[in-house]
Amino acid sequence: MSEERSLNFIEQIIEEDLANGVNNGRVLTRFPPEPNGYLHIGHAKSICLNFGLAQKYNGKTNLRFDDTNPVTEDTEYVESIKADIRWLGFEWEKELYASDYFEQLYQFAVQLIQQGLAYVEDASAEEIAAMKGTPTTPGTNSPCRSRSVEENLDLFERMRKGEFKDGEKTLRAKIDMAAPNMHMRDPLMYRIKHAHHHRTGDKWCIYPMYDFAHGQSDSIENITHSICTLEFIPHRPLYDWFIKELNIFPSHQYEFARLNLNYTVMSKRKLKQLVGEGHVRGWDDPRMPTISGLRRRGYTAASIRNLCDRVGVQKRDNMIEYSLLEFCIREELNKTANRVMAVLDPVKLVLTNYPEGQVEQLTAENNPEDPASGTRTLPFSRTLYIEREDFMENPPKKFFRLGPGLVVRLKNAYIIKGESVEKDAAGNITTIYASYLPESKSGGDTSGLNVKGTIHWVSAEHAATAEVRVYDRLFNVENPNAEDADFKTFINPDSLQVIEKAYVEPGLLNAQPGDRFQFLRKGYFVVDQDSTPGKIVFNRTVTLKDAWAKEIKK
Ligand code: ATP
Ligand code: MG
């Protein structure tokens, strides 16, 4: 959206900084994903914000992988994260890894020990937790707090050398065990983890905690505005404390509200469960709120950026309607997607008075919303497919489609009149018979008839077959996280419907994965990567109208 809007609160802060000459007008932001999963639409919000601010204020954005936890991280995730950011339309200044700073961070820790501001702790995690106290009662000092600088330096070096087992020792900052902010009660800086790291291999067996890695990494890179989500507000005093005591570049942290979408989950831990336990077909399953899933579903980068823009930058958590995301893509595809005809639930229609063996090439407009999109030709013949639901044997009064004696227009073709049907033993209609009006051809209709309904069709002999995957919400409830039960109990069992054999215009056989179309009267669809030369696979991106809004009110 390019229309004027007022500044968000982070833009206000940056403009004030610029006015006051802070950092000589330099703006450097960063996007700091942990490479432990694929990016989701919440990350897209953070990406659009960080890269967008840099673009707006002539600054730059670093991509920094926050890879301080060796156990959960993987290079597969690193690659997918980079691909997703580029697909969203952004390019980073530097590609950096917190693990590249492990030596520097170690030296920072040594410096704090030397300043008497950090100590090696012998207590177990449970004992440390017990010493922490509660928000209303002060904690108690650890006996290790009074260790000498020399002893601490020696123990810390031996931690690095691998002389201790996991959990045997930690390094803690010496701050204040009675601080009202629990994060300031001698927080952990380092833990021992004899684990292989995807980049540093077996070089390290001690790893810095988030709080000791994140702010220091910001500072090493001279980040000016470090933007994160609201849950980090209580961490900010510690962020500032480390920077002040180390006397290093003063990066500043600012917090905004996470993007939450209803009818889905967004934590990587939960998304990983959905993938790992086979509830979806992978991280890029079109039902997933991941960027790769949305892409495969047919969402464009512009539609996702548009959503992030509309949501804005808030200071309070809120829940965004999934239908707003759908609105964004629908609005875009209405302008850009070519219209085609596809019959998803086919039944045969024979035009009894149309000459056998005759084929006409009819002209059809590609997109009435876009005159530049041109026209295409469509083969028309005696035997067609139409949607089963477009015919009724005993239609009610206002059924403006096909039935015995009813007239309807075949899109881009002729007006037809229903005659009779043929059924199988079970009573299902197998063939519909109708007659056509030769003088009613679209573009040169001299019939003088005014018919109310228009239906889509394909020529049976010419149509291409396609598999069509129709998706619905992945969860049945608005907020699967808020309920008491496991979020997986709210999975919608009907979130995927596969139509094995639909018929589409023959021209679609040349479509490529990622090509987007409006199937007339049916919705917007995208060609899936599973397509093979003989068989094209479509994903439904979104319906033409917000059907869901009505349904939940029922
Ligand atoms: P998750 O809980 O989904 O695993 P995370 O915060 O642990 O998310 P990170 O990889 O650490 O994931 O996040 C990278 C950046 O993206 C962080 O700055 C984080 O604040 C931001 N981010 C993550 N989720 C959202 C969200 N829903 N809305 C906005 N920003 C988000
Ligand atoms: Mg995280």
Image (cartoon, rainbow, N blue to C red):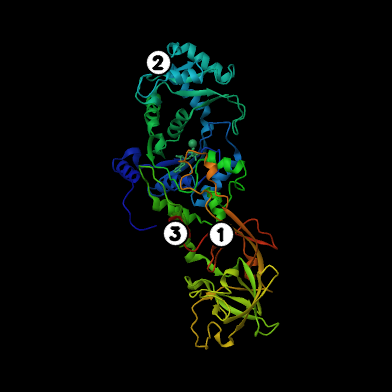
Q: Which residue is drawn at 62% across and 70% down?
A: 505
**Ligand 2 lies under 8 Å from the Cβ of mark 2:** no
Dot 1 or dot 2, earlier in sequence: 2
Is residue 444 positioned above or below 109 on the image?
below
Mark number, residue 140: 2
Q: Is mark 3 on a helix, strand or loop?
A: helix
Q: Does residue 361 show up?
A: yes
Q: In this view, does 436 lie to the left or right of 59?
A: right
Front residue (pair 474, 23) = 474
Q: Nearer the viewer, mark 2 or mark 3?
A: 3
Q: Which amino acid is tagged 3?
A: Lys
Q: Residue at x 68, y 67 (%)?
A: 426
Q: Where is residue 549 in the image (x, y as percent from the top left)?
A: 44, 57
Q: What element carries label 1?
A: strand
Q: Position of residue 471 (x, y in %)?
A: 56, 55
Q: Position of residue 433 (x, y in %)?
A: 64, 79
Front residue (pair 20, 395) = 395
Mark 3 residue crowding within 10 angstroms, few (<14) / some (14–19) / many (20+): few
For label 1, the residue is: 540
Between the residue at mark 3 and the residue at mark 1, the CA separation in whole angstroms equals: 20 Å
Dot 3 or dot 1, earlier in sequence: 1
Quadrant hosting residue 315: top left
Tag 1 near tag 2, CB within 8 Å? no
Numbered label tally: 3
Between the residue at mark 1 and the residue at mark 2, the CA separation in whole angstroms equals: 59 Å
For label 3, the residue is: 550
Q: Position of residue 54 (x, y in %)?
A: 41, 46
Tag 2 near tag 3, CB within 8 Å? no
Dot 2 or dot 3, earlier in sequence: 2
Q: Residue at x 50, y 21 (%)?
A: 125
